[in-house]
Image (tube, grey):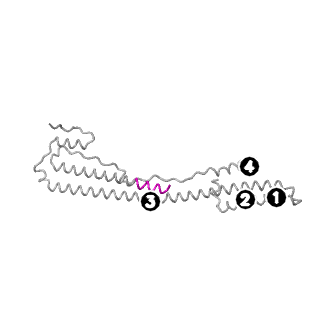
Amino acid sequence: MWLLHFIPDSLIVMVINAILLGGIGLTVGSLFMGFIPFIKQYKFPIEAIGIALLVVGAYLKGGFGAGAELREQVKALEAKIAVAEEKSKTANAQVQTKIITKIVKIQDKANTAKESLRRNKDTINAECKLTDDAINSYNFSITKTPTTPPAETK
Amino acid sequence: MRKLLLISVLLLTSCATAIPVKMGFPQLPEALAKPCDRLLPLDPAKKQLTDLLENTVDNYAKAKECYAKNQAWQEWYDTQRKIFEEVK
């Protein structure tokens, strides 16, 4: 049936209609041929050809109609998908912008906090120095596999 | 007779029609494709309180970034699911 894609639809419809109408014409005409003396002898072959054309025409008409309907559905679905893909791209761009803006804000905030710590370094460190145990305990909570477990408190 | 058989086979091909429509899987935004950064342990040589606090600030920032990424993942999934359901 893919061969038909190379032929214009209007031409196919015309041919199918011609076959169908020819079939109807011959089938109906053959009913009255019994009354005409010279054509009477051809009644059976004409009737057979008429019925054959009618069956083939009806099949083609139905098949082409169903195919056209299917093509319309495919076109509609393709259009829907194109819209969805465009929406998806837009949504992705929005998510990307949003997350990057958030990360920049978080980093800015962290930098401000660190600058403040550096400015007041002397005051903050004046009365405190970390022990190895404190660092071990802190790192234990962060690292996946700590090399040194935290020291036990007595 | 052979020709008639061939023609009937050609006619039957009209029944075998596949729908050539496919929808691609949505692309993940680049920022979400990277995994969250690991938290940094404190260098044992740095024993000052400000070192600990700076390290904590860095780690808080990493945790917040990870939380933001997690939220963005959920938002991305919800949006893409809605778009996908509109096509059905």
Taken as a whole, is the magenta stretch helix, strand or loop? helix
Q: CA distance from mark 3 to mark 4?
A: 52 Å
Q: Which mark is residue A31?
A: 1
Both on one chain, marks 4 and 1? no
Residues shaded magenta: B77-88
Distance of label 2 from label 4 (alpha carbons): 19 Å
Badge 3 density bin: few <14, some 14–19, many ≥20, Cα 10 Å: some
On the image, numbered disc 2 is attached to which residue? Answer: A20
Q: Decide: marks 4, 1 in contact (CB < 8 A)? A: no
Instruction: Residue type at mark 4: give it.
Output: Leu
What secondary structure is found at the residue carrying circle 1? helix
- Would you say residue A118 sits in the magenta stretch? no
Instruction: Give the image location of residue B61, x and y in percent.
Output: 26, 52
Q: In x, y percent, where is residue B69?
A: 33, 52
Query: Pointer 4: what residue?
Result: B4
Residue assigned mark 3: A87
Identity, as a three-letter code, of the amino acid under mark 2: Leu
Q: Secondary structure at mark 4?
A: helix
* Chain holding disc 2: A
Sort mark 4 into few (<14), some (14-19) or many (20+) by Cα contacts within 10 Å.
few
Q: Which residue is located at x 18 percent, y 56 percent? A: A116
